[in-house]
Image (spheres, rainbow, N blue to C red):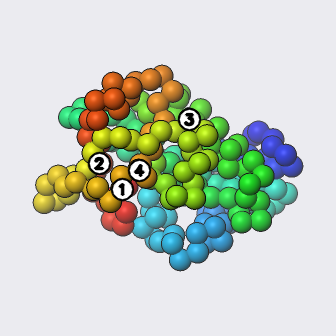
Amino acid sequence: MNRGAGWVTEVRHTADLSAPTRRAVRELLAAAYGEDFSDDDWDHALGGLHTLAWLGGRLIGHAALVQRTLLVGDAPRRVGYLEAMAVHPAWQRRGVGRTLLRQVNAQVTRAYDFGALSTSDEGLGLYQAGGWRVWRGPLRVMTPAGVRETPEEGGGVLVYAPAGTLDAAQEEGAPLTCEFRRGDVW
């Protein structure tokens, strides 16, 4: 557990989340995203580590880091993919998001080749301030019908590579390809 300005954070695997904690996460995501958070989005956030920020007994922040395999060019890479990052509206812009992101960055550094996420315009500044960079190469998805480009995602897919393992691929504009899944592929 870590302590912030009045809140405490903890990290738990999906398997270790109690039913009340899962409900609290869903309620937080509904408060933060409203109708923009779907059942598919929830499914994407399961199966990895959940960093939770608590104030008293109330959940005020959440971030899920799940494993995905992405192709950088033609090379498969083990990636920590950030999903369902949210801070309760009453606690936004108070450092909760920065605290969650620092912990996610540490998890990526310890366990993955690099981190990746898809962001909204609202979240872009937070992630860039936390060391995440916009992927400059083409974005693609492997679908049942073959690989297809996802240019609509340009500028919204970010990577975190603290060891510089992606510098050459970034500079050369290598394609980044994700696997197909229901809902948003990125």
Residue at label 1?
153
Report which residue position mark 4 lands on.
Answer: 155
Picture coordinates of residue 38, whole percent (x, y): 47, 71
Q: Position of residue 113 (x, y in %)?
A: 41, 30
| Cα–Cα gap, marks 2 and 1 | 7 Å
Q: Amino acid at mark 1?
A: Glu
Task: Determine the CA span between mark 3 and mark 4.
Answer: 15 Å
Query: Is tag 2's residue or tag 1's residue first in the polypeptide sequence?
Result: 2
On screen, 111 above or below 34?
above
The mark found on residue 131 in the picture is: 3
Picture coordinates of residue 37, whole percent (x, y)? 51, 70
Q: Residues within 10 Å of mark 3 (few under 14, many from 20)?
A: some
Task: Kindly indicate the quadrant of the structure image that contains residue 90.
Answer: bottom right
Residue 64 visible somewhere in the drawing: no
Task: Residue at the far bottom: name it.
Answer: 35
* Residue toward you, 131 or 145: 131
Extreme residue toward the left, this view: 145
Mark toward the start of the polypeptide (2 vs 3)? 3
What is the quadrant of the N terminus in the image? top right
* Amino acid at dot 2: Leu
Residue 74 in view: yes
Q: How far apart are labels 3 and 1 at the CA level? A: 20 Å
**Contact, CB < 8 Å: mark 1 with mark 4?**
yes
From this view, report whether residue 39 is shown above or below residue 184: below
Horizontal relation, residue 173 to residue 64: left or right: left
**Element type at marker 4?**
loop
State the quadrant of the C terminus.
bottom left
Q: Amino acid at mark 4?
A: Gly
Q: Nearer the viewer, residue 164 or 129?
A: 129
Q: Which mark is residue 139?
A: 2
